[in-house]
């Protein structure tokens, strides 16, 4: 835990940033930066919680003047372990741990109060108790023997350690933040939501939750599709019940802390109606759930629109991180198919490639194998106002999304979009807010997930028909300027902050 910026305390609004601002560009980071710069009359603070320091390459943003506090901590950077002195452990504390674990396995009803108590984690069941006491060891080995005794114990043991160790880091942050903020705002559940819940509960502060994607759903996708559990040479196509139990431990953990955040937060915000319904399904009280769409600076992006030439470039641009959840591989294959009908088509991949280097390398290998070096370009991070005027289509091929700000940015720059049917993409492209929105018309095409043929067909249909492309462009500009302007977005949050802080006028 390290404080990088500390001035003009207390902070009006403390934002908990999990793996985003200020160390990762785009997405939620851009949203946080937009919020701070657009509401200069509030003093903001950031608590950044990441995985390990080596996973990030320095600060990516110039700080606005109203960012007055920045703390960073890394959940899986443990450093040298303390000397493990022998200890038996308090049986009453162990009893509370057993009740907590029972609730995570069957999370009906209210969660145990200890889960939102900083003192519980720092005094009653501290890190040394759970990681080193004899009673905790007995508890871990008993569960192992009951649930997954046929798998190597070392894998189960380190999974349990990995799930629990960040909890004490989060509790220590919450303790350090005491008295430094008036309001907590988290852009996700997960570790950020758990930290926000602890601070809010212990300091009796308002907690606002804005979910950009449904964190629990995305972690479930990551876990069920990952190779995290291949260390034991498990064939993922023939997984045992024990391997599945390990994955379910992680899933239950994230679902449980998500419910805790939903219980504490008010309001619970999402970016589109589909996300609101998902929040309710995962345990959020319906009466606290609201939708506030993202907004974009149509004035700034309007300059990119003005810079467009009359011709429609045969360039399909994907703006996003080169990671598996963005399904870059399907995009590359779609360009291969589209090139048979549009020989000069290009696919531009605009975004960082360092988050998952192995996946990025696989994508580049596919480009080489499919002889696409002249068609697919990895451009890294770019200023989108330079890229969008040179593009003919924006595309998004993700397997999971919330409300992609990049689609709205493309609309404001006069760019139709072809996207997979995830998150709010269909709502943005076809309209769904009300009858007026629907009547505007389609601003592109929506296709199934992981369907390179459908993507290619949409690319060639729009790029090959100027009249159809210009109609989609007209609809994109109309929709973003009517419903998704930055001014509307900022006004909504200004109102929410004022109400939560009790500010008048």
Image (cartoon, rainbow, N blue to C red):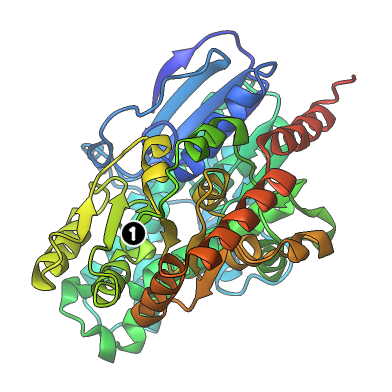
Instruction: State the image quarter where residue 384 is shown.
Output: top left
Image coordinates for residue 478, horizontal then vertical, percent: 68, 50
Q: Residue at x 33, y 45 (%)?
A: 51
x and y, in percent, of residue 410 in the image: 50, 48
Of 30 and 303, which appears nearest the observer? 303
x%, y% of residue 464? 41, 69
Res 137 visible: no
User: Residue 396 lies in what quarter of the image?
Assistant: bottom left
Q: Which residue is mark 1?
A: 314
Residue 86 in view (yes/no): yes
Going by the picture, which residue comes out furthest to the bottom? Answer: 238
Q: Nearer the viewer, residue 118 or 206?
A: 206
Residue 252: image location, x then y, percent = 51, 69
Q: Quadrant of residue 120?
A: top right
Secondary-structure class at tag 1? loop
Q: Is residue 457 left or right of residue 104?
A: left
Task: Between residue 148 and residue 308, name the one nearer to us.
Answer: 308
Q: Residue at x 41, y 55 (%)?
A: 312
When the figure is inspected, residue 424 is found, relative to residue 53, above or below; the finding is below
Q: Is residue 125 above or below residue 340?
A: above
User: Left or right of 214: which side holds 160?
Assistant: left
At 65% from the left and 17% from the top, the residue drawn is: 40
């Amino acid at each position: 835990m390290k404080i990088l910026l500390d001035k003009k305390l207390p902070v009006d609004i403390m934002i908990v940033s999990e793996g985003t601002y200020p160390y990762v560009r785009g997405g939620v980071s851009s949203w946080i930066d937009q919020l701070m710069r657009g509401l200069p009359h509030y003093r903001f603070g950031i608590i950044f919680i990441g995985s390990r320091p080596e996973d990030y390459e320095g600060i990516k943003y110039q700080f606005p003047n109203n960012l007055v506090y920045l703390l960073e901590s890394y959940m899986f950077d443990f450093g040298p372990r303390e000397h493990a002195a022998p200890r038996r452990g308090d049986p009453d504390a162990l009893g509370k741990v057993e009740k907590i674990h029972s609730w995570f396995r069957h999370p009906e009803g209210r969660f145990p109060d200890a889960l939102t108590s900083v003192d519980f984690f720092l005094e009653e069941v501290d890190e040394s108790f759970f990681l080193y006491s004899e009673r905790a060891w007995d508890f871990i080995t008993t569960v192992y023997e009951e649930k997954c005794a046929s798998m190597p114990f070392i894998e189960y043991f380190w999974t349990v350690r990995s799930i629990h160790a960040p909890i004490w880091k989060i509790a220590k942050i919450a303790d350090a933040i005491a008295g430094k903020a008036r309001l907590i705002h988290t852009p996700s559940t997960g570790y950020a939501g758990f930290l926000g819940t602890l601070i809010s509960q212990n300091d009796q502060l308002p907690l606002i939750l804005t979910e950009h994607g449904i964190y629990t759903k995305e972690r479930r996708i990551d876990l069920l599709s990952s190779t995290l559990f291949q260390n034991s040479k498990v064939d993922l196509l023939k997984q045992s019940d024990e391997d599945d139990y390990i994955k379910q431990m992680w899933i239950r953990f994230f679902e449980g802390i998500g419910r805790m955040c939903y219980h504490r937060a008010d309001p619970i915000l999402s970016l589109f109606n589909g996300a609101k319904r998902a929040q309710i399904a995962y345990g959020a009280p319906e009466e606290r759930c609201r939708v506030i769409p993202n907004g974009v600076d149509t004035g700034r992006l309007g300059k990119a629109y003005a810079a467009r030439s009359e011709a429609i470039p045969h360039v399909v641009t994907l703006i996003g991180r080169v990671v598996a959840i963005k399904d870059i591989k399907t995009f590359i294959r779609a360009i291969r198919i589209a090139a048979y009908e549009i020989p000069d088509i290009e696919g531009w991949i605009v975004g960082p490639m360092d988050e998952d280097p192995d996946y990025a390398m696989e994508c580049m290998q596919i480009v080489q194998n499919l002889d696409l070096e002249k068609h697919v370009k990895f451009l890294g991070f770019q200023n989108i106002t330079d890229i969008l005027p040179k593009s003919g289509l924006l595309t998004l091929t993700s397997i999971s999304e919330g409300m992609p700000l990049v689609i709205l940015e493309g609309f404001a720059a006069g760019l139709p979009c072809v996207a997979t049917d995830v998150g709010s993409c269909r709502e943005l492209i076809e309209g769904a807010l009300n009858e007026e929105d629907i009547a505007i018309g389609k601003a592109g095409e929506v296709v199934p997930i992981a369907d390179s043929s459908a993507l290619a067909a949409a690319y060639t249909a729009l790029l090959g028909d100027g009249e159809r492309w210009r109609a989609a462009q007209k609809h994109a500009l109309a929709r973003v300027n009517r419903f998704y302007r930055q001014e509307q977005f900022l006004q909504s949050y200004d109102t929410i902050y004022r109400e939560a802080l009790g500010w008048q006028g």
